[in-house]
Image (tube, rainbow, N blue to C red):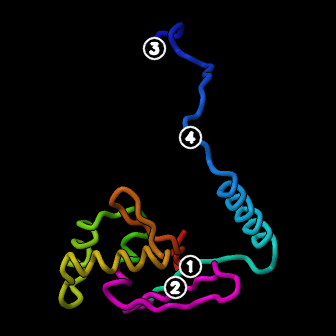
């Protein structure tokens, strides 16, 4: 690298600016989250697995914590996407490997993924899915 050609100071004008209302909303959400995290009512999102299903405990909504049970194949998807992000193809292959009954078709898997993302159990980015809930019975 030619050290004489490396830029270390930039001046620029932003083409677009964040609306003040949106900025204030984000700032308020961060304040609320910090306040809640400092209180005894900490938010949580974790899952516990059994032999045939996964139970997700979601305490992110402060007014109504939830417990949701997911049977196969959703339980397998949650488990598969825990360690590293997985593509739809990797998830489909993982379902085949488990050997639990009939493997759902790709459209059904896509619907399951969309439902788990909508419930904010999974996060999707660039065609990969990652479990947001932390496992309770993990070995560290």
Label 2–label 3 contact, CB within 8 A: no
**Nearer-the-camera pick, 12 or 8:** 12
Q: Residues within 10 Å of mark 3 (few under 14, many from 20)?
A: few
Label 2 SS: strand
Label 3 SS: loop
Label 1 SS: strand
| Mark closest to the chain's N terminus, 4 or 2 | 4
Residue underneath mark 1? 46
Name which residue lies at 53% across and 7% down.
4
Residue underneath mark 2? 56
- Left or right: residue 23 versus residue 69 is right
- Residue 123 shown in magenta: no
The Cα–Cα distance between marks 3 and 4, rounded to whole angstroms, is: 33 Å
- Residue 100, quarter of the rendered image: bottom left
Label 4 SS: loop
Q: Residues within 10 Å of mark 2 (few under 14, many from 20)?
A: many
The Cα–Cα distance between marks 4 and 2, rounded to whole angstroms, is: 40 Å
Q: Which residues are magenta?
A: 50-76
Q: Give the number of the mark in front: 4 or 1.
A: 4
Q: Position of residue 102 (x, y in %)?
A: 18, 89
The Cα–Cα distance between marks 4 and 1, rounded to whole angstroms, is: 38 Å
Label 3–label 1 contact, CB within 8 A: no
**Nearer-the-camera pick, 135 or 24:** 24
- Residue 71 shown in magenta: yes
**Nearer-the-camera pick, 42 or 28:** 28
Label 4–label 2 contact, CB within 8 A: no
| Mark closest to the chain's N terminus, 4 or 1 | 4
Residue underneath mark 4? 16
């Amino acid at each position: 690298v030619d050290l004489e050609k490396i830029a270390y100071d930039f001046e620029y004008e932003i083409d677009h600016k964040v609306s003040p209302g949106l900025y204030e909303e984000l700032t308020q959400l961060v304040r609320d989250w910090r306040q809640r995290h400092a209180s005894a009512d900490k938010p949580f999102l974790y899952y516990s697995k059994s032999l045939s299903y996964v139970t997700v405990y979601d305490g992110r909504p402060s007014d109504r914590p939830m417990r949701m049970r997911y049977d196969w194949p959703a339980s397998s998807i949650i488990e598969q996407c825990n360690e590293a992000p997985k593509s739809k193809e990797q998830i489909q292959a993982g379902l085949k490997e488990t050997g639990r009954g009939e493997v759902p078709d790709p459209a059904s898997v896509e619907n399951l993924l969309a439902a788990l993302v909508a419930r904010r159990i999974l996060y999707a980015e660039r065609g990969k899915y990652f479990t947001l809930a932390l496992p309770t019975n993990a070995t560290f």
